[in-house]
């Protein structure tokens, strides 16, 4: 039977480490890793053996929601679900897609503002701090320029 890789985010923002430990332990039969997504949601990545992708999706959803209930999170909503074949998951891990990025100065030039204004709007513009520098998704800057330009 084939294997699938599932990534699920729940509408849970954990506040107690004990609950996240229970969540993690309940998912160990699926070789899971758990943590927080970049958006602060409870996040799980697990391996599922199933005949088809829809079966893997159902099994992963069941496993994660049962683990959430056991950890005291009730029955949270799933805010993100991605299920891939093992081959596709491996291919994506081996060749990650990084979107075109702009420096703070480049973003400022695109938007026709000073770099301090870009810094003030960093969250709104999708800015990511890398070391001491900020980078911005070029598509997000172009969309903002087109919308406000």
Image (cartoon, rainbow, N blue to C red):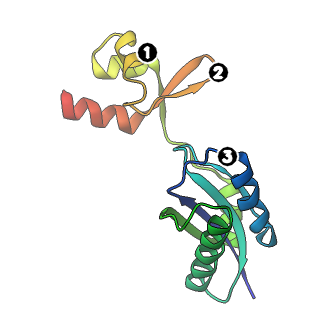
- Which residue occupies the foreground of this view, 87 or 44? 44
For disc 3, the marked residue is 16
Foreground mark, 2 or 3, reads 3
Any part of residue 88 in sight? no
- Whole-percent x and y of residue 3? 73, 78
For disc 1, the marked residue is 105
Any part of residue 49 in sight? yes
Q: Which residue is drawn at 62% across and 68% down?
A: 69
> Where is 123 relative to 65, above or below?
above
For disc 2, the marked residue is 131
Q: Disc 1 or 3, which lies upstream in sequence?
A: 3
> Where is 135 relative to 116, above or below?
below
- Which residue occupies the foreground of this view, 143 or 59? 59
Residue 53 figure quarter = bottom right
- Whole-percent x and y of residue 20? 70, 53
- Between the C-alphas of marks 2 and 3, the distance is 29 Å
- Between the C-alphas of marks 1 and 3, the distance is 40 Å
């Amino acid at each position: 039977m084939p294997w699938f890789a599932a990534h699920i985010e729940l509408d849970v923002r954990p506040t107690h480490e004990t609950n996240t430990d229970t969540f993690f332990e309940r998912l160990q039969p699926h070789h899971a890793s758990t943590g927080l997504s970049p958006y602060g949601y409870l996040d799980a990545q697990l391996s599922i053996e199933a005949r088809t992708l829809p079966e893997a999706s159902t099994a992963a959803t069941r496993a994660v929601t049962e683990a959430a209930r056991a950890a005291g999170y009730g029955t949270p909503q799933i805010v993100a679900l991605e299920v891939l074949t093992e081959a596709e998951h491996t291919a994506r891990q081996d060749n990650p897609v990084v979107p075109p990025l702009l420096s703070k100065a480049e973003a400022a030039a695109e938007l026709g503002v000073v770099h301090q204004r870009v810094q003030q709007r960093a969250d709104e513009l999708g800015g990511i701090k890398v070391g001491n520098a900020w980078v911005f998704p070029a598509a997000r800057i172009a969309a903002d320029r087109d919308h406000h330009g």
